[in-house]
Image (cartoon, helix red, strand yellow):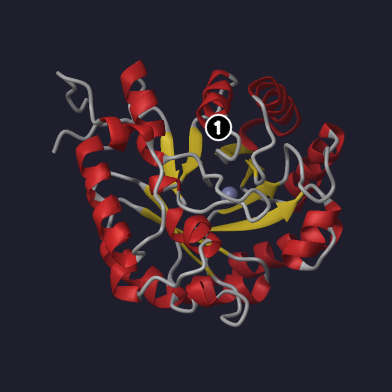
Amino acid sequence: MTRHPTPEVLISEVGPRDGLQSVQATMATADKLRWIDALAAAGLREIEVASFVPAQRLPQMADAAQVVQHALRHTGVRIMALVPNVRGAQAALVAGAQKLTLPVSASPAHSMANVRKTPEAMVAEVRAVLRLRDEMAPGVPVEVGMSTAFGCTLQGLVPEDDVLRLAVQLAEAGIDEIGLSDTTGMGNPAQVSRLFKALQREIGALAGAAHMHNTRGLGLANCLAAYDAGVRTFDSSLGGLGGCPYAPGASGNVVTEDLVFMFEAMGVSTGIDLDKLMAAREPLETGLPGEPLYGMTPEAGLPKGWSNR
Ligand code: ZN
């Protein structure tokens, strides 16, 4: 095992959650578990494995508790779950999730469409989740991924002041970390740099992950801009699984394989073995036959002389 002792960036794999919830097909539980095992074997240290939402809303996530329980065997990997509310948080904590993430939209229109609550009502929900966490599992960090922070398909532009004000409210509520999500792939590198720097000025060390989508091909450029702005946690999805329903044919999250290649080629260690990472596409392809997978690095292969660092 040539895992770097102290990777400089944390790649948080969100495919089993963000990816799977965006596709029509439902992946069989056994295939999900094989996929997660392969991701862990590649050296990923954080995997968002499921979303604890009502099964009638997202049948793809009906096995969330089982998936979390299985994934916990991978010591050294932090098992994350998305929870939209207190009820989901309770189920996730009972299942043993080691980190929770809540979606809070900066755009009121997206917030209503996604969780049927205003951003203000979601801040109250976050407070309630934090109280529950304090009772049930005080060691479990809770983060907010702020959706539509760089623009919203429904609302259009999202004022940066709205993003920062919401971040301050969440910090005051006691959240452990706030990341910014480009849910609809509208962000650009200048904006990403400006907004993450402003976020750090407002909430300091609570500023968290960059969650970029590749809808318009700017996913990697946006990640690099975030890295230059001081961000060290990046969400991405194997094979860029997923997509935006408003942009047919567009790829979804930034591709984990390409993101790892970029950082490793720059000499920024990720702790991830690229060969094993690309091998993790096999269980994904098997579990979701016919689903298009993206990624330039898997297509081109690793350059001659490449060695895992
Ligand atoms: Zn996303």
Amino acid carrying label 1: it is: Gly
Asked if residue 74 is positioned above or below residue 297 in the image, the reply reads: below
Residue nearer the viewer, 209 or 303: 303
Q: Is residue 66 left or right of residue 187?
A: left
Give the residue furthest to the bottom. Answer: 56
Residue ID at (25%, 36%) = 274
Visible residue check, residue 170: yes
Query: Please, what secondary structure does the residue beneath circle 1 have?
Result: loop
Q: Is residue 34 left or right of residue 106?
A: left
Q: Position of residue 18 (x, y in %)?
A: 52, 56
Residue 222 placement: quadrant: top right
Visible residue check, residue 73: no
Residue 35 placement: quadrant: bottom left
Residue nearer the viewer, 113 or 135: 113
Residue occupied by mark 1: 217
Residue nearer the viewer, 259 or 95: 259
Q: Position of residue 163 (x, y in %)?
A: 79, 39
Q: Is residue 124 left or right of residue 146?
A: right
Residue ID at (51%, 71%) = 93
Q: Quadrant of the C terminus?
A: top left
Q: Position of residue 117 (x, y in %)?
A: 82, 65
Q: Position of residue 46 (x, y in %)?
A: 40, 49
Asked if residue 238 is positioned above or below residue 124 in the image, the reply reads: above
Residue ID at (63%, 38%) = 206
Q: Is mark 1 within 8 Å of ligand 1?
A: no
Residue nearer the viewer, 7 or 133: 7
Residue ID at (64%, 43%) = 181
